[in-house]
């Protein structure tokens, strides 16, 4: 089945999705900034009888993203699926209090990082019969007044901007890569995810999101779907 990369690895969506793809025969690579989180992930997979290999990289640095993808290809083999769950924290709180030149930092992971990963894995993906680029996103980027008001309430304008730009990039990539047989899909999570630091009562089970990603990879008929609590 090839190699599956979970970029922005964490204990929620990316762990559950990597677990789902591992059951289908994929080789698993975990990429993140935290060596402790990566080590914990490798140990959790090992306890489940799954071999996962960790790679440390900052998703906001295109050069490091490309380097990580190259190492994974060399050590684990051709890449056939990528999951992008990495996102920028709330560095931009209130756009009116932010120096305009600093706002571009909000797009470092969701746009520049994701694009760098896509380009670096592109040759492998074009050669795969079931190639997929999967993106987890948040509803804060919705083009609605409700989402805008919520971004203001949370004082998280940067995350809202990143989510919106990332969703547009997903759509563009889907159009440009469709003829190459590469599926690009986004799951927008409306709410919190169980097992993560921001989880609240009624949070979404990560396994449900993982199953949705797998279903999209198989059906390849929708670019954007949503899941809610």
Image (cartoon, rainbow, N blue to C red):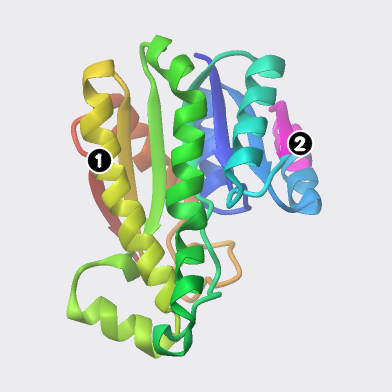
> In the drawing, what numbered circle is on residue 143?
none
Determine the residue positioned at 48% across, 15% down: 124
Distance in Å between CA atoms under marks 2 and 1 = 39 Å
Q: Nearer the viewer, residue 51 or 145?
A: 145
First-in-chain label (2 vs 1): 2
Asked if marks 2 and 1 touch (Cβ < 8 Å), the reply is no
Determine the residue positioned at 50% across, 25% down: 121
Q: Nearer the viewer, residue 9 or 112?
A: 112
Determine the residue positioned at 73% across, 30% down: 53
In the picture provided, is 27 more to the left or to the right than 228? right
The total of numbered circles placed on residues is: 2
Q: Vertically, is 115 above or below 81?
A: below
Determine the residue positioned at 58% across, 64% down: 196
Q: Vertically, is 183 above or below 137?
A: above
> In the drawing, what numbered circle is on residue 47?
2
Q: Vertically, is 68 above or below 106?
A: above
Q: Quadrant of residue 63?
A: top right
* Circle 2 Cα neighbour tier, 10 Å, few/some/many (<14 / 14–19 / ≥20): few
Is residue 11 a member of the stretch shown in magenta?
no
Tell me the element at label 2: helix
* Residue at which label 1 appears: 172
Dividing the image into 4 quarters, which one contains the C terminus? Answer: bottom left
* Circle 1 Cα neighbour tier, 10 Å, few/some/many (<14 / 14–19 / ≥20): few
Q: Vertically, is 112 above or below 198?
A: above
In the picture provided, is 189 more to the left or to the right than 92? left
Image spot of residue 148 (x, y percent): 27, 80
- Segment tinted magenta in the rendering: 43-55
Image spot of residue 175 (x, y percent): 20, 33
């Amino acid at each position: 089945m090839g190699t599956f990369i979970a970029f922005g690895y964490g204990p929620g969506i990316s762990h559950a999705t990597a677990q789902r793809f591992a059951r289908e025969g994929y080789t698993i690579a975990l990429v993140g900034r935290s060596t402790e989180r990566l080590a914990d992930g490798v140990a959790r997979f090992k306890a489940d009888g799954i071999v996962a290999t960790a790679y440390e990289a900052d998703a906001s640095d295109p050069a490091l993203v490309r380097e990580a993808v190259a190492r994974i290809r060399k050590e684990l083999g051709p890449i056939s699926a990528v999951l992008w769950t990495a996102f920028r924290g709330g560095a931009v709180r209130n756009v009116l209090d932010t120096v305009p030149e600093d706002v571009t930092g909000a797009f470092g992971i969701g746009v520049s990082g994701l694009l760098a990963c896509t380009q670096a894995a592109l040759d492998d993906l074009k050669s795969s019969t079931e190639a997929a680029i999967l993106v987890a996103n948040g509803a804060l980027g919705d083009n609605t007044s409700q989402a805008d008001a919520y971004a203001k309430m949370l004082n998280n304008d940067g995350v809202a901007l990143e989510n919106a730009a990332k969703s547009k990039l997903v759509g563009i990539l889907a159009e440009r890569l469709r003829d190459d047989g590469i599926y690009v899909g986004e799951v927008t999570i409306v709410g919190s995810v169980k097992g993560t630091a921001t989880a609240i009562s009624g949070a979404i089970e990560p396994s449900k999101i993982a199953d949705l990603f797998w279903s999209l990879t198989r059906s390849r008929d929708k670019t954007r779907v949503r899941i809610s609590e």
